[in-house]
Amino acid sequence: MSDSETVPQAAAPETAGSAPALPQEALKIASGYAFAGPALDLGALIWDGNCLPDAQVRIPLPMLNRHGLVAGATGTGKTKTLQLIAEQLSAQGVPVFLADIKGDLSGISQPGLSNDKVRSRAAEVHQQWTPAGFPAEFLALGGLGHGIPVRATITSFGPVLLSKVLQLNQTQEQSLGLIFHYADTKGLELVDLKDLRAVVAFLTSDEGRAELKNIGGLSTATAGVILRSLTAFEAQGMADFFGEPEFDTSEFLRTASDGRGIVSVLELPAVQDKPQLFSTFLMWLLADLFHDLPEVGDADEPKLVFFFDEAHLLFNDASRAFLDAITQTVRLIRSKGVGVFFVTQTPKDIPGDVLAQLGNRIQHALRAFTPDDQKALKATVKTFPDSAYDLEELLTGLGTGEAVVTVLSEKGAPTPVAATRLRAPESLMGPVDATALDEAVRSSPLHGRYAQAVDRESAYEKLAARPEKAPEPPTRTAPTGRRAPRAKEEPSVVEQVVGSGMFKSLARSVGTQIGREITRSLFGTTRRRR
C-alpha cells in the first residue's frame, strides 16, 4: 500500500489506554479547526449526540476582524458566548466593546464561581477552568444607570442618525439635513437639543426665513413636525444623551497595565424601553470609530472587537440609504482593524448585504413553534455552507450552551459546520453588585473626564443674544430733481451674530470644532480631530 493510501490515524484500532479514535466524519470536521496560529477556544465538537473533547472548535485571532454573527432564541446562551469570547480577546490583549442589554455582563470584571454545572461542563470539553476577572470599564448612555456617561453632541450625531431616532420620514430627514448644513456653515454649533430647537425656530421666523431661501427653504409644516418630535423626545427623558463632554470612542482601544485588553461594557438596562435610541447610538459609536481610525490592512490581531447586541432594532424601518451606509461601514471598517459581531435571534434579522460580510457564525438553538418560526429556521439553514449534519433537526435540538459554528480559517476559507458544546466563561456569570459597580465607576480614570456635564455657549445662547433689529429710519423726501440717497443695507441677523466680537472670541477658543464647515460621513456624523 502506498503512502497516499495509508489508513488515517483516526480509523486505526484503539489500543489499551489510548483515547477513543474520532469517527471519520468528525475527524474531517475537526481538521478544519486545527489552526497553527493564535486562536480563541470555543468548545468541543458534538457528533452523533456525543461530545468529543479531543476535537476542539476554535476561531483564528486574525479572523476576528472579518466580523461575525451570534444568533439564537432567548435563553439559549448567547450572552455567555459573548462573555466567553470577550474574556479570551482581553487575555490576548485585544480590547472589546459589549452592549449589555440585560445588565448581566458586568460580571466579566469579577472571577467566576465554581459549581457543579461549571465543573461538569469544563470536564466535558477538556477545559482547564480557572476563575478570573478581566479589566472592565462601565459606561451608561447619558449617565442613566451605573456607568461613565456616554454623550454625543447633536452636531456630531448628525441628521441621518437623529432622523432615525426621531422617526422622521424622508422629506423631513432631508429638511433636517438642510438645517444641519446651515448650522455647520454658519458656525452655530449644535451641542444639545435646545440648540437644534433654537436654529429650527430661527429659520422659520420672519428674520431667518430668507437664510435658506436660495437652497430650498424650510416649510413651516416640516419645521413643526421636527419641533414636535424634539419636544416629545425630550419629554421622554432623552435630553441627557446629547451634550458635552462628548465621549471619545478612542477610549475603547485601551489596554490595561498588564497588557490585557479593556472590556468596555455599555450598560443599557435603564434604556431598554428606548430601542430606537440605543441601537442608533451604537451605530454612532461604530461610525465614529470608522472615521477616526487609520487603515491597517490585515493585521495579526484586531484593534477592537465590537459586539452589537439586539442588532435587529437597528434595521427595523431603516431606509435604503441608511442600510447602504451600514453595509459600507461594515465592509470597510475591517481594514481599520475593527471586528463587528451582530447579536440577534436569527440571521433573517440581518439584511442580506450585511449578512454577506459576516464570516464567523455562532448559531444557538432556534424554536419552531409557529409557521413564522419554521420559515426563520429554513432561512437560517440556507445561510450555512453544506454540512454533514441535518441542520433543521440539529438547530431545534441544541441545548443551552451549545451552538452550530462555522468560521473563517487562517486562509480565509469557511470551516466545516461544527455542532459545538461551548466552554464555560471564567468570570462571574451574572451581574456585579450595584455598590461595587458604582465604586468601579468612580475609580475609573474616565470619571473625571466625562462624569460632569458641561453647558457652554452654543447655538441657543448665540441666537438668544442676537441684537434686536433696529427700527427703520423715517423716509425723507428728496429735493425736486435729485435722487434720494440709498439707505445702507442692514446685515442679516445671522451676519450680525457671526460678525460679533463675542462670536469671534468663541470661534478662536474652540477653533477645531466651529468656525469651519464640518465634513460629514456616510451617516452625517462629523469627523472630529483628536
Image (cartoon, rainbow, N blue to C red):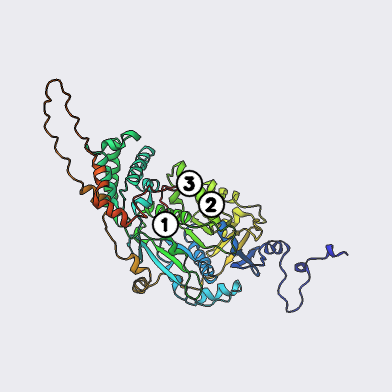
Question: Residue 284 vs residue 411: left or right?
Answer: left
Q: Residue 483: x percent and y percent?
A: 17, 24
- Residue 223, can we see it? yes
Q: In terms of depth relative to the viewer, which is nearer, 151 or 46?
A: 151
Task: First in sequence, mark 3 or 1: give its number.
Answer: 3
Q: In terms of depth relative to the viewer, which is nearer, 361 or 20?
A: 361
Mark 3 and mark 1: span between their CA atoms?
A: 22 Å
Amino acid on which disc 3 is placed: Ala
Which residue position is annotated with label 1?
529
Q: Tell me the SS state at disc 1.
A: loop
Mark 3 and mark 2: span between their CA atoms?
A: 11 Å
Quarter of the N terminus within the rendering: bottom right
Task: First in sequence, mark 2 or 1: give its number.
Answer: 2
Which residue position is annotated with label 2?
332
Q: In terms of depth relative to the viewer, which is nearer, 407 or 431?
A: 407
Question: Residue 513 vs residue 330: left or right?
Answer: left
